[in-house]
Image (cartoon, rainbow, N blue to C red):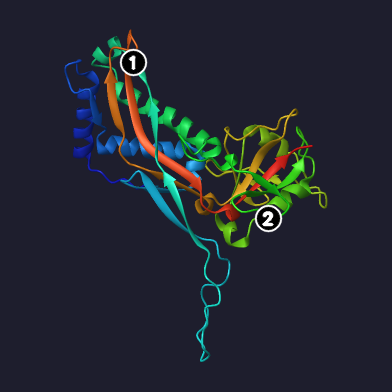
Amino acid sequence: MNISIDNQTVNTDSKKFLNFLRGNQNDQATIDLPTSISDSITSKIQILSPIKSLAKVTYTSNDRLDVVVDTNDSEASGWITDELIKCEEISAISKVSIHLHQLFAKPRVSHTLLEDDTANVEEFIHDKITTQMAASENKSFLFGDGISQPKGILKYDISIGEQKPRQIEGIVGGEPGKITDYTKIVELMEKLPSKYLANATWIMSRNAASHIRTLKDGTNGKFLWQNSIAHGVPDTLLGYPVVICDDMPKISEKEASTPVLFANLYEGYQIAEKPVINILKDPFNAKPYVEFYATKRIGGDVVNFDAIKALVLKK
């Protein structure tokens, strides 16, 4: 999300926000956050949320986003000849409706802090809303039920072997607690169609990364994992970047899990959200603190199952 706002607008928005935060109970109880502040929160959430930073995000003014999906793999372009062109296949076009759900954050501050003119209370509230919403968003993009929150990637069934409709294709990469066969990592990578490889990433928790970084190629003895040599550049696995997402399942010794995804989430997962964040001031129900109740609407769902592959550990 590119933001270009002049300094005068930012200063005006900051004053409006600060006046709201420090006003007494007779002042306005709820406002839409000023544009520059809501845009700042939205942008920082996108950085803090690993899944959101990879997925496609669309901003909308509606409570639902309809996404047109074409699952036909036949060629849609070619060369015109003198022969009559016949359309023998009807493209498998469908629609995915992504409903937006209400997400909230509830930062609290003391009356003393609000009354302290030297305290940067607006930055404190800004940061709390950002971190709280980012944490909830990222979990929902993986495990959300799709009813009261976005539909998570790992809420869908994973088909082993032949991929089934509206299921994520996966392979068994070992038993609970073990990823020992390097060939399964290679096999998972090869499952992703070539057209999605350009923006493909590995997504896993630090726990899973600690297991996989020890794997070596059985042919030449080299590590599959390559550490980054520059700040801000991700580590790579088989040449593709690794994104650490601590909300991903850990490698458990007791139960089946899905600790690794290899995916092009820009093609595979769609997020829709309204750019407006509303905030309500509540000085009564969290005494001795003042509670600020911030809300926004956001949704998400898988729109292309071919662009997401999963490694499963089970007996």
Left or right: where 128 falls relative to 4: right
Residue at the bottom extreme, as displayed: 82
Left or right: where 27 falls relative to 192: left
| Residue placed most toward the observer, 252 or 164 | 164
Of pointers 2 and 1, the one earlier in the residue sequence = 1
- Does residue 116 show up? no
| Residue placed most toward the observer, 190 or 123 | 190
The answer to which quarter of the image holds residue 17 is top left
Please name the residue shown 79% across and 40% down the image.
180
Please name the residue shown 78% across and 49% down the image.
183
Please name the residue shown 29% across and 27% down the image.
279
**Helix or strand or loop: what does disc 2 sit on?**
helix
Amino acid under disc 2: Lys
Amino acid under disc 1: Val
Residue at the top extreme, as displayed: 288
Q: Residues within 10 Å of mark 2 (few under 14, many from 20)?
A: some
**Helix or strand or loop: what does disc 1 sit on?**
strand
Which percent across, then down, holds residue 37?
Answer: 29, 34
Q: How far, Cα to Cα, is label 2 from label 1?
A: 50 Å
**Looking at the image, is 81 positioned above or below residue 264?**
below
Give the residue pinned by disc 2: 191
Which percent across, then down, holds residue 216?
Answer: 78, 45
Give the residue pinned by disc 1: 109
Left or right: where 116 falls relative to 234: left
Residue at the right extreme, as displayed: 219
**Looking at the image, is 104 positioned above or below residue 314?**
above
